[in-house]
Image (cartoon, helix red, strand yellow):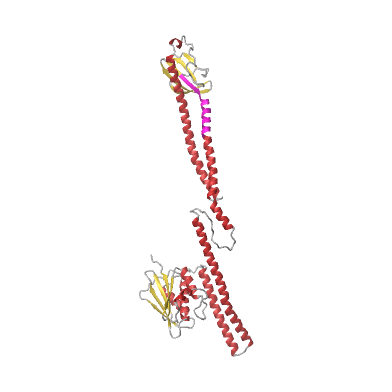
Amino acid sequence: MSLRLRLTVTLGAAFVLLWGLAATWMLFDVRNQLMLSLDQRLAASARMVAGLLVQLPQPQLGEGGAARLSAEQLGIPNGLACQVSSLRGEVLARSHAAPDDLLDAQRTGFHDQMIADTAWRSFTLIQNGMRITTADRLDERDALKRSVLLAAALPVFIALLGSLIVLWIGIGNGLSPLRRIRIALAQRSADSVEPLHIERLPRELAPLVETQNQLFARIAKTLERERRLTDDAAHELRSPLTAIKTHLQVAAMTDGDTAKRALAQAEIGTDRLHRTLEQLLMLARVEGRVSFDDGLRCTAIDVAQLAITDASQQAGPAIDMHAADNLSRRVLAMPPALAIAALRNLLDNARRHTPDGTAVRLTLEPHGERKVRFSVQDHGPGIPPEMIERFTERFWRSTEGDGSGLGLSIVQAIAERCDCELSFIPLSDGLRVDLVVDLERTD
């Protein structure tokens, strides 16, 4: 069911219910007022006839019970039956609309009576020694009531029908911005990430289009990032593959030490290619929101020790770890795999730029009440502060080294994913990198 039809049915049902209740109330009140008016007409006619009888000459009031009064003399309205009788029951006058049989005038006030299979509503008044009875037929009353109710109900029905038509048109006009948004989206190409520009949107739909445009912007950034990653990866992988192929060709064409050196260089190229591929896969998993949560949690000391063990598998400077005495023993609020990977990449980067004979310093200390800070400091040649912004660019290297240029990019991606704080502080004798990680709450 469309939204327009659903709204029309819902609101239309509410309209029909409210209009139906109001119309029923109104018609019921009109009916009661109509019956009350007809009864008041009977009573008023009886009192009018009683007043006229007083003004007539007394001799005309009857001799021997004969009807000596003319209905026209009494001014009886057309269609209204009237009967004047004495207290002894002698009929003095009757109107032309009166039934053939006599009206029951024994009871005063209003009452219903059947005369010759016809229902009558009568009113009897006793005044000046006479009984004045006025009456009208109930079937004529019912016909009048039906015509009045029909005349009152017809405008209500027409108004209700018109309201439903106006409601259908109004909802259609109200939903036209959604139709324009749908048409604008349908007319876009499959690879279009340009923002939507739709004029005269209501306030309720403006946030929807704004959110949609923000989604397009994020998609555009993701596509651009993936494109750059593909281009950079193709360029970076081409060099070691070419070198491996060249060394293998040299080894195939030579013998002895030359062939061995060529094979050794091919193995070095293979190791570099393997590390680059591992870094690419890690970066893709981190940015692709692959779950690393295996249910395990580690403290800062555990993460540091595991990262040092992984980083020390390659030859290079030593790593000195210093943990503050007041370091919290609470577990980190991030998956251990990501924490270890981030710290290992920082240590690998620091060892790569630290000369032999010196050591990389790893410091663990509290940072506020619910955080811990990992500080990795090398003793390299240092780097200008204006180059810091390029540290986390993919495949960017500050020197011609054997690194893949992806380590700090992975650290940045992990920091963004786990809401960590990553900062680079240039020093006179090297570089310090701080990684601030949240601790899990105990409450």
Where does the image place residue 179, in percent across and percent down from the top left? 56, 53
Relative height, residue 186 to residue 54 (above, below)? below
Where does the image place residue 122, in percent across and percent down from the top left? 47, 22
Q: Nearer the viewer, residue 338 or 355?
A: 355
Whether 346 is among the magenta residues is: no
Whether 145 is among the magenta residues is: yes
Spot the residue most to the bottom.
Answer: 256
Kindly identify the residue that appears in the image at 47 percent across and 69 percent down.
Answer: 416
Relative height, residue 320 to residue 186 (above, below)? below
Kindly identify the residue that appears in the image at 50 percent across and 56 percent down.
Answer: 206
Which secondary structure class fits the magenta region best? helix
Kindly identify the residue that appears in the image at 51 percent across and 30 percent down.
Answer: 148
Residue 351 is at least partly visible in this image: yes
Q: Which residues are magenta?
A: 133-152
Where does the image place residue 403, in percent across and percent down from the top left? 51, 79
Relative height, residue 212 to residue 251 (above, below)? above
Q: Nearer the viewer, residue 386 or 167?
A: 386
Number of labelled discs? 0
